[in-house]
Amino acid sequence: MAIPKVELLIQNVGKRVRDLRQEKEMTQLDLAIKSGVDERQIQRLENGHTSPTLKTLYKVTNGLDIDLFSFFSFLKE
């Protein structure tokens, strides 16, 4: 069965967070501390188990030192 588009987007957002975090050689705990988002929530986000609110995603992208709009550049690919 095909994955619904919204579920695929949630998974891609989580993968993007994980990829950016790893590029910066940060642990999930590092990102949690820097962004002010609970480490468990970072884990759920990266695994595609939760759809982040805009507020949470804003905090996470700030923690990754990336502009929120730049974060979504993967959608153009």
Image (tube, grey):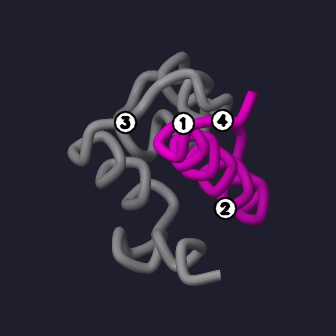
Q: Residue at x 30, y 40 (%)?
A: 56
| Contact flag, marks 1 and 4 (Cβ < 8 Å) | yes
Q: Is residue 71 above or below residue 73?
A: above
Labelled disc at residue 3? 4
| Contact flag, marks 1 and 3 (Cβ < 8 Å) | no
Report which residue position mark 3 lands on: 52
Labelled disc at residue 7? 1
The label nearer to you, 2 versus 4, is 4
The CA distance from mark 1 to mark 3 is 12 Å
Report which residue position mark 2 lands on: 20
Magenta highlight on residue 5: yes
**SS of the residue at dot 3?**
loop
Q: Which range of residues does the magenta coloring cover? A: 1-27
Decide: few, some or many residues near mark 1? Use Cα within 10 Å; few <14, some 14-19, many ≥20.
Answer: some
At label 1, which amino acid type do we have? Glu
The label nearer to you, 1 versus 3, is 1
Q: Is residue 4 above or below residue 43?
A: below
The label nearer to you, 3 versus 2, is 3
| Dot placed on the residue nearer the N-terminal end, 4 or 3 | 4
The CA distance from mark 4 to mark 3 is 18 Å
Decide: few, some or many residues near mark 4? Use Cα within 10 Å; few <14, some 14-19, many ≥20.
Answer: few
**SS of the residue at dot 2?**
helix
Quarter of the picture containing the C terminus is bottom right
Labelled disc at residue 77? none
Q: Residue at x 44, y 79 (%)?
A: 70
Magenta highlight on residue 20: yes
In the displayed structure, does residue 31 sit left or right of residue 69? Answer: right
At label 2, which amino acid type do we have? Leu
